[in-house]
Image: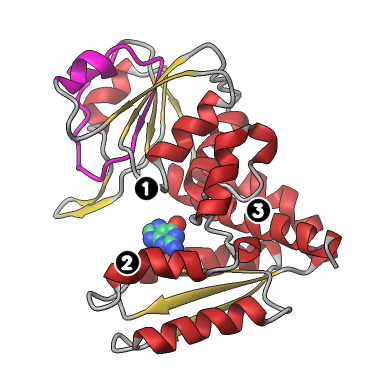
Amino acid sequence: MTQILSGREAADALLGTLSEQVSQLDPKLVVVQVGDDPASASYIKQKMKSCEKVGMRHEHKHLPADTTREQLFSLIEQLNADPDVTGFIVQLPLPDHLQPLVPQVIRAIDPKKDVDGFGAYNLGKVLLSREFEHLPPATPSGIIALMEHYKIDPAGKHVVVVGRSNIVGKPIALMLLNRDATVTVCHSRTPDLGVITRQADILIAAVGKPKLITADMVKDGVVVIDVGMSRTKDGLTGDVDFAGVEPKASAITPVPGGVGPMTVAGLLRNCVRAKERQKEQD
Ligand code: GUN
């Protein structure tokens, strides 16, 4: 029997552990949205809903699509300076005229308030060791929490990560290395992907290509974590051909209801951690 790794269940458990700290520390999360990307609207709704669930103060700042760079950077400065704001994120993607500025936007966010964990300071700490993973990016941190919830220990396992993005592939590879896994990272220039993915004890797919991973590309008993979430004519589709791969897997995440809710839980946990650290430095 294949175990379904429910992100909804694991996220509820993680959020449950946060509520007490939230009521003691009273952190506040701000989500900045520019424009009306439909996927962003749905992600933000999930984030706000989870804040309500744990009693975390939250604010959704929704700016129009024609917001100028000056207006966006001025808001970031304001949020950096506001002592009542514990952490904030700028939801991506930005409208076309601002999208090339994403690296500068990320750099402009105070590392102490960078609860997405996208900036060089917080990513750099992930490189050092597990003890320095203070504000890790929310998706990899959610994947680790999901594995912990289901008692999947990566130590000594061969983990194959497909995808090398700065926000999922690279940091999850480092975080698993920090937990004694043997890690292989594959990407769009990897020849014969299947030769590598078939060696995986744990396979993490994070490329955004619907159904890229097919049954012939995995070995029996593999644990599959699907980070992909593409909108196709069949609805939300992961990077893994679930129907084909599930019978061979010992455990697998569904899409939706797998990694997605864990990302939100990881973000809220970062907000609590940010507040803890800010209080220590008061
Ligand atoms: N767009 C899709 N996922 C994310 C996320 O985790 N953070 C931000 N800022 N934008 C996103």
Residue 142 in percent (x, y) is at: 53, 43
Q: Nearer the viewer, mark 3 or mark 2?
A: 2
Marks 3 and 2, Cα distance to the nearest angstrom?
A: 23 Å
For the residues bearing labels 1 and 2, Cβ distance under 8 angstroms: no
Which residue in the structure is indicated by mark 2? 93
**Label 2 sits on what residue type?**
Pro
Q: Residue at x 61, y 48 (%)?
A: 12
Which residue in the structure is indicated by mark 3? 269
Marks 1 and 3, Cα distance to the nearest angstrom?
A: 21 Å
Q: Residue at x 38, y 63 (%)?
A: 103
Residue span colored magenta: 192-219
The answer to whether mark 2 is within 8 Å of ligand 1 is: yes
Q: Quadrant of ligand 1?
A: bottom left
Q: As rendered, which of 191 and 9 lies closer to the eye? A: 191
In primary-sequence order, the first of circles 3 and 2 is: 2
Q: Is residue 199 magenta?
A: yes
Residue 215 in percent (x, y) is at: 21, 20
Residue 201 in percent (x, y) is at: 41, 15
**Label 1 sits on what residue type?**
Pro
Marks 1 and 2, Cα distance to the nearest angstrom?
A: 20 Å
Q: Nearer the viewer, mark 1 or mark 2?
A: 2
Q: Residues within 10 Å of mark 3 (few under 14, many from 20)?
A: many
Q: Secondary structure at mark 1?
A: loop
Q: Residue at x 28, y 19 (%)?
A: 197
The answer to whether mark 1 is within 8 Å of ligand 1 is: no
Q: As rendered, which of 227 and 6 lies closer to the eye? A: 227
Q: Residue at x 14, y 22 (%)?
A: 191
**Label 3 sits on what residue type?**
Arg
Which residue in the structure is indicated by mark 1? 256
- Quick one: quadrant of the N terminus? top left
